Image (cartoon, rainbow, N blue to C red):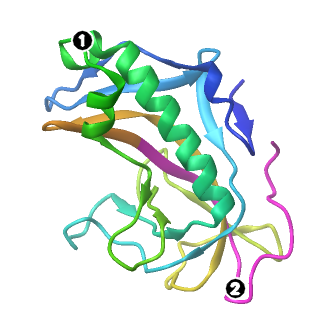
Amino acid sequence: MATYSYVVDVERFCLAEPQVSAKGVKAAQLKIDNEAVYWLPEPMEVAFDPRSYDGSDQARVSLCLLASDGVAAQLANIDDAIVKLAALHSTALFGKTLSPDTVRAIYSPMLYQKGSYPAMLRPKLILTGRNQTKYWDEKTKKPLETPADWKGRKVSARLLLKGLWFQGSTFGVSVEVTDALVGDRTGLTSVCPWGA
């Protein structure tokens, strides 16, 4: 049974052995009690329509969510725990022993902030396949088609903290939206249709 939580119990994080895909991409699954880690943060406003990093059509696109102070604090706590865990397992992950400070220097935090823009969380929407993100209408609680426009909407997302990704000399946490309760631009008025 998966672990769902409004506050992630970072003290129980563990990592599966790093795996390398057929395409040469290295990843390590993040677990709690050998189960996937799901997080149900408070509803957030969408800053921009979802898009891929390079603007091309992709099966995965980033959803830019404006992070409240509460979400930012939880993300900082998760980031700190990931850095400690990666330092503890640095030999398996990076091929050598690294200090927490060295790991932090190569870590890409989940909370993204650039210049004067507000802090954002950028989880991935999965657009195709069996793990495709599911959308729910905030008022009816019924399934929705993929929304055509996102900017300014309030979204309550069930997030999968999938695991660690590695690219070049950096690494970070892969975060996917498994379900999104989509509100209008006046905000969400109810709770998520899935349990915690």
Say whether residue 126 is visible.
Answer: no
189 lies above or below 126: below
Q: In this view, does 185 lie above or below 91?
A: below
Image quadrant where residue 173 sits? top left
Q: Where is residue 183 in the image (x, y as percent from the top left)?
A: 71, 78
Q: Is mark 2 on a helix, strand or loop?
A: loop
In front of the other: label 2 or label 1?
Answer: 1
Query: Is 66 left or right of 86, judged from the image as shown?
Result: right
Using the rendered image of the protein, determine whether residue 56 is visible from the camera's viewpoint: yes
- Find disc 2 in the rendering and name its residue: 184
Residue at screen point 51% across, 85% down:
151
Position of the C terminus, as image quadrant, is top right
Point out residue 113 in the picture as x, y percentages from the top left corner: 39, 66
Q: What is the magenta range?
A: 174-196
Tell me: residue 179, above or below residue 38: below
Q: Tell me: 55 left or right of 162.
A: left
Identify the residue shown where x is 61% and y is 22%: 35
* Residue in the picture at 68% in, 58% down: 70
Residue matched to label 1: 97
- Front residue of 51/70: it is 70
Quadrant of the image occupied by residue 7: top right
Identified by mark 2, the residue type is Asp
Outermost residue to the bottom: 186
Which mark, by number, is residue 177?
Answer: none
Q: Earlier in the sequence, mark 2 or mark 1?
A: 1
Q: Residues within 10 Å of mark 2 (few under 14, many from 20)?
A: some
Secondary structure character of the magenta stretch overall = loop
- Which image quarter: residue 90? top left
- Amino acid type at circle 1 is Thr
Q: In this picture, is 169 found above or below 64?
A: above
